[in-house]
Amino acid sequence: MNGAPPVLNRNLKPLPKAPVRIVHLGLGAFHRSHQAWYTQHAGDAAEWGIAAFTGRRPDAAEALSAQDCLYTLVERSAGGDSFEVIGSIVEAADGADVGRLCELLAAKETAIVTLTITEAAYGLAADGTFDAGAPGVADDLRALSAAASGETGAAAAAPGTPLGRLVLALARRRDSGAGPLAVVSCDNLSANGDVARRAILGLASAWGTGLAEWIEANASFVSTSVDRITPRTTDADIAEVAEQCGYRDSSPVVAEPFRNWVLSGDFPAGRPRWEDAGAVVVDDIEPYENRKLWLLNGSHSILAYAGQLRGHGTVAEALGDSVCRKAVEDFWDEAAHHLHAEGLDIPAYRQALLERFGNARIAHRLAQIAADGTTKLRMRAVPVLAAERASGRNGAGSALMLAAWIDYAGATREFQDPLASEIRAANELEGIERVQALLRLVSADIADDPGIVDMVSGLCGTFTAKTAASTPL
Ligand code: CS2
């Protein structure tokens, strides 16, 4: 039609359509730049198709389905862009389509469930325990009970959270006799396999249909450390793909060239040969997890809060500000005291991070990273602070991350957080009481330690005093 470029599809790019053997929850840009890329590059890719269910963005399934689930991965290095069409996702569904999820989990061919549902969606309490009263969980439990008793109509509404839906689908798998499978969390949480296990078993036991025992015996919870910086796609990216590739793609994904995937755990029904694509399988994942969560994600959080307070919009801009960079390097020094395992090569990792963060062609928005602070800081600041204190040091580098978040929480009008209303309530307090109330949302242990509360309180204002951003956040 008047020379308009065609829509991307499998006739245009004849990529094989593998059978569904992986079910993914959380169809977002990161899944598409990371696990889908690794699956496409596994030696046995032709045997492993992904059916991906949306999480926060239900329209993503429709957009992707309209182009045969193909999309372009734009690999953006400091020197330029390269383009690759990814075809390992073979089905994209609305996360609310719980019927389809149950059908797929009941199928013997399905061997793996991968998750990128965000840190906050595991819904555990700050101390890591299952919380039947957490928002969403109680509703899920009502929906699960209704499903078990065969109720129909409004009362039988399907579970609304990804894990609630998964628990229902695991019950269908048990009933169908399709056998064991692996659940693989790809969210930035320490011991994410254990966290997934606790959250899923917590729901299943509270439901109380004997499902928890079946899950214990049949599901393997794999822990992973995942890494690939993947900013949100912009209209300019969509236009660039149309121009450079000669087809229309409504859903390209932009990512840095770097990628890393470390996994630990069993796959009772098999898995793709992801190691052909560079994934690493290890017995002890903790050192890799900590290196990534503390050094990369921790410094991301510092940059997100400190950077925005100082008027920056992206990671590269914030890193170029010597005040923010010093905060990052001080925190790295602290974290490095607790990263000793052989082969971690912390100096090289730090150097690589400076280069990755400094890639100004990747416009990684600080506002995107700032979301869900209460959950993220629990993983990124608290363990380093606790380890520093236990070693007799004060942990000021980690405390500064918390102080930056507290100032950001006071300065911004719109923030996304599972505890947003609690943050608002804490913000009504003043002085040290406010600091303590906000810290309590991250960790009770920290809020109960007067020495830490004092130190964090003293660090508040570091990024706002005299150097405040001219525009409100
Ligand atoms: C970021 C991560 O948004 C965030 O919290 O720190 O998404 C980060 O970009 C990825 O973990 C990189 O692998």
Image (spheres, grey):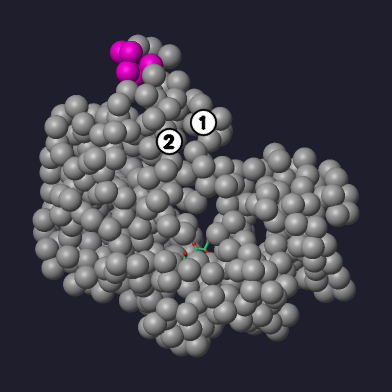
Q: Quadrant of the C terminus?
A: bottom right
Badge 2 density bin: few <14, some 14–19, many ≥20, Cα 10 Å: some
Residue at position x 56%, y 30% from top?
133
Please give left or right for residue 95 compared with residue 330 in the image: left
Q: Determine whether label 2 and label 1 are within 8 Å by CB.
A: yes
Q: Nearer the viewer, residue 123 or 66?
A: 123
Q: Rounded to the nearest whole Å, what is the CA distance between mark 2 and mark 1?
A: 8 Å
Quarter occupied by residue 312: bottom right
Asked if residue 360 is positioned above or below residue 275 in the image, the reply reads below
Instruction: Say whether residue 149 is magenta.
Output: yes
Tell me which segment is drawn in magenta: 146-150
Q: Nearer the viewer, residue 73 or 375?
A: 375
Whether residue 174 is visible here, answered yes or no, is yes
Label located before the other in sequence (2 or 1): 1
| Main SS of residues in magenta | helix
For the residue marked with disc 1, what is the amino acid?
Answer: Ala
Q: Position of residue 348 (x, y in %)?
A: 46, 87
Q: Nearer the viewer, residue 346 or 114?
A: 346
Residue at position x 63%, y 64% from top?
386
Asked if residue 233 is positioned above or below residue 65 in the image, the reply reads below
Asked if residue 271 is positioned above or below residue 356 in the image, the reply reads above
Please give left or right for residue 339 compared with residue 328 in the image: left
Whether residue 324 is visible here, answered yes or no, is no
Please give left or right for residue 246 compared with residue 132 in the image: left
* Residue designated by label 1: 132
Please give left or right for residue 282 compared with residue 132 in the image: left
Instruction: Say whether residue 213 is magenta.
Output: no
* Residue designated by label 2: 202
Q: Position of residue 232 (x, y in %)?
A: 48, 60
Badge 1 density bin: few <14, some 14–19, many ≥20, Cα 10 Å: some
